[in-house]
Image: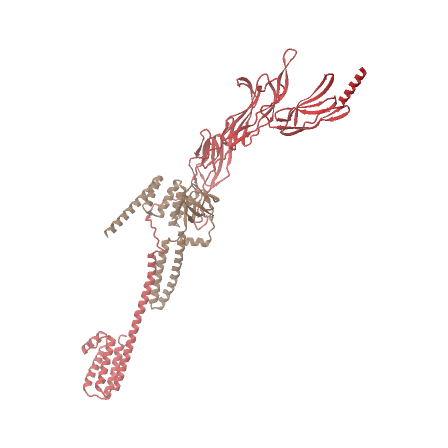
Chain colours: A brown, B red
Amino acid sequence: MKIFLVILSIILLSNQQVDEIFIQSNNHYTNGNYEAALDGYLEIINSGFESSELYFNLGNTFYKLNNIPESNFYFEKALAISPNDFDVITNLSFAQNLRIDKIENLPVTQIQNIKISILDLLSEKGWAYSFMISVWLLCISFLLYFFLKNSKSKRIFFTISIFITLISFASLYLNYEKKAQNNIKYAIVFDKEIEVWSEPNKISELKFLLHEGTKVKQIDIIEDWVNIQLENGTLGWIEASSLRVLD
Amino acid sequence: MRNLFTILLIFKSFILFSQVKFDASVSKSKLGLNERLRIDFVMNQNGDNFSPPNFENFQIIGGPNQSIKTSYVNGERSFSKTYSYFLKPLKKGNLRISQATIEIDGEIYKSMPIEVLITDSVSQPSDSVTQYYSDDDIELRALISKGSPYLNEPITIIYKLYYKAPINISDARETETPNYKDFWSQTIKIPQLKVQREVYKGQNYNVVEWRKVVLYPQKSGLLEVSPLSLNLVLDVPTDKRDFFGNVIYDQTSQLISTGMRKINVKDLPKNGKPDSFTGAVGQFEFDVILNKKSLRATESFQAELKVKGNGNLKLFDLPNMLVPNSMELFEPEREESINTNLSGMSGSVSKYFTVIPRFQGNFPIEEVEFSYFDPTAERYKILKSPRLTIDVFDGPTYINPSISNESNVITSDDSFRFIKQKGNLKRIDDSKFFESEIFYILSSTPFVLSIALIAFTAFTRNRKQSYSETIKKQEKSIYKMIDSAKKLTNDKNQFYDIIEKAIIKSLMVKFSIRMESLNKDKIQEITKNKGISVENISQIINLIENCEKAKYSRSSDSEMNNDIEEARKIVGIILKINS
């Protein structure tokens, strides 16, 4: 019990400290002292904290320091936590405007769009919780249906439990979809200019060049090489050292 | 005798006359392009109407010179008449001099055609027509500034004509212009040929700079520069003097050449060659100049990449600019202002990029790298432009359609968002909830619980049912007992015993009490607690008392029947209680 209290106090204390550092860094940022703000934000990350807001502020700081890949990286991280934050979307597009590569996105169908926006409503954990809650509700409503004698309330709880069954199946499906979505790793190019090859070696055909800040989808990894896909669907191999994975 | 001698003489001369010769001979059958050739057409009898061949591919420098020689040797007369031409070949190769014709005594004779091989110019024309000056007196030199330059390092060749007294040059024409294969060349104009004096080989010479060329080798290795050949018209003094005692000058023409020159071009060193190297060799300065620092979106600005200095400015590409993808970059324009003098090209080359930003933001312009090889320092140098930023205001923000559902939304009032003030910091949590153990446990518990609950209720219901069934059975058995008592009307004792037992059993079944503890008071107590009406209780007690009394007293059959009916009624009442 004593040990638990000590641990709790440490956590609480560092939480407080971290909040202080955050506010300090915000002040540095406001005063245009971007390097100092950057140090503070990075310290927070190193002490094991995160939040969409922290990543967003880091992205902003790197943007102000004209660091294209880092600002893209942290805006993407912020967006992964809160996919519907319009501030993040706006500033990410500013950061993307700085990139040198111009990649047309593949057209997304209306159904895919709807699916993505539904998946983005909750985090992976949120979907798991929603499934659990719906399962509990299902059981409760079924028991009510089972034990109530009144035929009117029986009818009501029967329909309710069928409805909740559908919901829980849907949320289970969404759970798996979200998991699959989260298993796709994206990465940001950090080198000024890198070569993309048609095979994972340097004797194959050189396909094209990529520049810093570009976001790529990581499909496969063989030793030091990563098979990547661009947003326009083009495939190629890149040396892993020039990428930083978003996770 | 004298007559005979004359006849013999005439005869002899006839023999001679009958052998007409007409030959063509050349002074050389093989000669350089800058040398000259003499061709003689010789006949041993006098002829008329000499027609020379048309000297194709040759230029007639002198002639025809006619000479007649008559000599008497031992009284024999020999005659020869010669037509001589001085020829200069116009091109290389195996050239053919065709036939000449002459008419001797009404007959036409033809000479044999002659073939002459013309080779490349030789540096020292061995053929000298006039011997009044020595070969040392005139020389054409090609002065190369550097014998083994680097690739793309400028070298100059100055062609100088040296001559000294007593020769004077009255005219000069280029017959062979050097061709600078594998070089980029530029001839520097000499407005007027000037004669200067220079000491060369310890002697005073008149010097004329004939031609100045700046060359940039474009290939490494041993490169050849083909010779320059001049056809000079010389004023040469003769040994004759005029009436006043002045030396009479004669004009002759002479070909003079520099000969083939070789230049060994070194390749640029391989190690330390920067990636951005595009072939610039020299000494340069590099700068990137933006004509605007901030502008509205959809306005244009110009970025100028400027390389200034000395070197092969015309011969390399300027680096390209990289701009963010949201800017439109137009094809660059190249502008040069270059002077070429003896030390090479100098000046500046600029590349103008017109750029139109389409979205607002603060855009960094990638630093541009320019590298060149400095041949004097013999190493590569890299110049980088400063990192410039351009501020674009008052324009739309591009929203990535993959993030937003509304594709390509462009809203004009979107500006760069300020940082968030609230941290909401949480410990980084990598744990997964979905498909974790807790997830499985928590999501399966409701099912387990509800199944257990349903099973439990089903079990209890079942037990209740079986309990009521046993009661029913016992009720039946009680009624049977009462019915069996009917048959025992003759044995009074047994009859009342059974009735009493039936009542007690019914009470036992109903209230699950034990037989031993039963007495009247207890029954009264229990039945009262179970909420049986007072009337019924007294009835029960009465009946039990009756039964006990009847055991020891006489009673009629009708009374016994009455008692049975009574017992039935009471058992019915007991069993109905509380169900």
* Residue B64 rendering spot, x and y as whole percentages: 69, 22
Q: Would residue A87 be seen by someone viewing this image from the given angle?
A: no
Residue placed farthest to the front in the image?
B1
Q: How many marks?
A: 0
Of residues B432 and A126, which is closer to you in this image?
B432
* Residue B415 rendering spot, x and y as whole percentages: 41, 44
Quarter of image, res B510: bottom left
Of residues B165 and A83, which is closer to you in this image?
B165
* Residue B329 rendering spot, x and y as whole percentages: 48, 40
Q: Is residue B33 left or right of residue B503?
A: right
Residue placed farthest to the top in the image?
B244
* Residue A56 rendering spot, x and y as whole percentages: 37, 45
Is B310 located above or below residue A139 in the figure?
above
Q: Would residue B50 be seen by someone viewing this image from the given angle?
A: yes
Is A46 located above or below residue B119 in the figure?
below
Quarter of image, res A189: top left
Of residues B347 and B129, which is closer to you in this image?
B129
Quarter of image, res B104: top right
